[in-house]
Structures are given as C-alpha cells and as structure tokens.
Amino acid sequence: MGVTIKQVDLDLGILVREYRQEKGLTQLDLARRLGFDSPQFISLFERGLSKIPLNVLGKLITILGIPEKKIMKSLLKSYEVTLRQEISAGKRNAG
C-alpha cells in the first residue's frame, strides 16, 4: 500500500507548519484566526497527532494560502488507503 493514514496526517501537518511559518504566524496566532483560544489544537495536527477537521481546511487554505490541490492530493491518498483497508477486511471476513 505504501502510504499510511498516519503518514498522510503527518504530511498535512508539515504542510500547514511550513505555510504558517512562511506567513510569520505563531501557532497561537493561527489558532486565534481559526477561532480557538489555545495553540494546542494547531500543535497536535502539525505533529500528525490529530487529524485536521475538514471544516477547518477551507479556513487554513484561505488564511495560509495553501494551494487547494496540495491538500486534496493528501486527502485522496488517505481515502484510498482507508478504502483499500476496508475492502481487504471485508474480503477476509467474507468466508
């Protein structure tokens, strides 16, 4: 399979960190612009420890200027991995 879901989360987190730093924003700055009081939210997904909520992605794309294609590519990889795992599990449990 190659790419794991965890790796996709980490890749997205690294992408967000890079764009945040390019914009000169701290984790707290970005958290506040997203409507959160704590930078912990940003820290968790930048380190790949938490998924970026889908409803936050549009805001991140706009605030940080991340090309939407980059985000979509990572998410589609993640979906493909999940889909393959579910199909394999179904095959194993079918007989």
Image (cartoon, grey):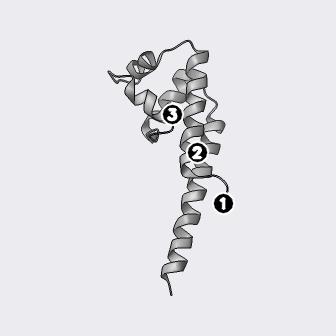
Q: Are marks 3 and 1 in contact (CB under 8 Å)?
A: no
Q: Which mark is residue 47?
A: 3
Residue at numbered disc 2: 8
Quarter of the picture containing the N terminus is bottom right
- In x, y percent, where is residue 38? 34, 22
Residue name at image x 50 percent, y 83 percent: 94
Q: Which mark is residue 1?
A: 1
Above or below: residue 48 compared with residue 2: above
Q: Earlier in the sequence, mark 3 or mark 2?
A: 2
- Amino acid type, label 1: Met
Using a 10 Å C-alpha cutoff, classify the residue at mark 3 as few (fewer than 14 neighbours), some (14 to 19) or many (20 or more): some
Q: Secondary structure at mark 3?
A: loop
- In x, y percent, where is residue 29? 43, 15
Residue name at image x 39 percent, y 22 percent: 39
Using a 10 Å C-alpha cutoff, classify the residue at mark 1 as few (fewer than 14 neighbours), some (14 to 19) or many (20 or more): few
Q: Is residue 91 visible?
A: yes
- Amino acid type, label 2: Val
Between marks 3 and 2 in the image, the one whose residue lies nearer the viewer: 3
Mark 3 → mark 1, Cα distance in angstroms: 23 Å
